Amino acid sequence: MNICVFCGSASGNDPIYAEAAKAFGIQMAKEGHTLVYGGGNVGLMGIVADAVLEHGGKVIGVIPDFLMRREVAHLGLTTLEVVDTMHLRKQRMAELSNAFVALPGGWGTLDELAEILTWRQLGLVTQPIGILNVKDFFSPLLDQMRKMVEEGFLKLGNLELLVVEKSPAELVGRFSSLV
Ligand code: AMP
């Protein structure tokens, strides 16, 4: 299956994040999954892509033209699709993928995760969505999501759509069983 990964264009301050991104990529390749991602060669993005490629897996990058021109594209991918805008990138990544995962990251990762959860809530996509909660990185965000449920802004059933795992192997395994 094709798993879309949203993650940081930085690597974070603790090496645990790079190790988790690498482990996630290795696990994907071992189970025969293809990586779909933003096509960058920087941060956790580059680490997860390299891990999949080094272990014999395929990687499809989808990158907007302006980032390609800033020379942040990974030029060793199986396929690199260049699109016109950030919006088209998200749409194309969704079309190509059977599941979505967020690893730690910043605004870009949060945007991609929030958008795909919104699309799923509205029934525009049906694929499973998960987060890798390494070092409890996403726990404050999960607390915020619970607050949204408590305060009546988010349905519990929509919160429960999100698959949360701490270990790369378990998260990939959960997807393999869902699809
Ligand atoms: P961030 O979490 O803010 O580092 O943004 C990372 C996410 O946004 C990735 O999943 C990418 O799809 C996109 N993105 C942000 N910066 C870049 C970049 N320099 N190269 C490629 N994609 C990027």
Image: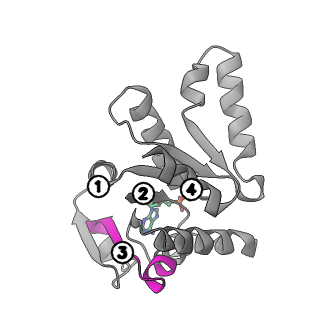
The answer to whether residue 67 is visible is: no
| Amino acid carrying mark 2 in the image | Cys
Residue under the image location 43 percent in, 81 percent down: 53
Ligand 1 within 8 Å of disc 2? The answer is no
Residue under the image location 30 percent in, 67 percent down: 66
Label 4: which residue? 173
Label 1: which residue? 96
User: Does residue 25 sit above or below 153 in this rendering?
Assistant: below
State how far apart marks 4 and 1 are (Cα): 20 Å
Percent coordinates x, y for residue 136 in the rendering: 76, 52
State how far apart marks 4 and 2 are (Cα): 15 Å
| Amino acid carrying mark 4 in the image | Gly
Q: Read off the magenta span.
A: 50-67
Residue 33, by quadrant, is bottom left
User: Does residue 95 sit above or below 159 in this rendering?
Assistant: below
Label 3: which residue? 58
Percent coordinates x, y for residue 150 in the rendering: 71, 17
The first of marks 1 and 3 along the sequence is 3
Percent coordinates x, y for residue 18 in the rendering: 65, 74
State how far apart marks 2 and 1 are (Cα): 8 Å
Secondary structure type for disc 3: loop
The answer to whether residue 114 is visible is: yes
Q: Is residue 61 magenta?
A: yes
- Image quarter in which the N terminus is found: bottom left
Label 2: which residue? 4
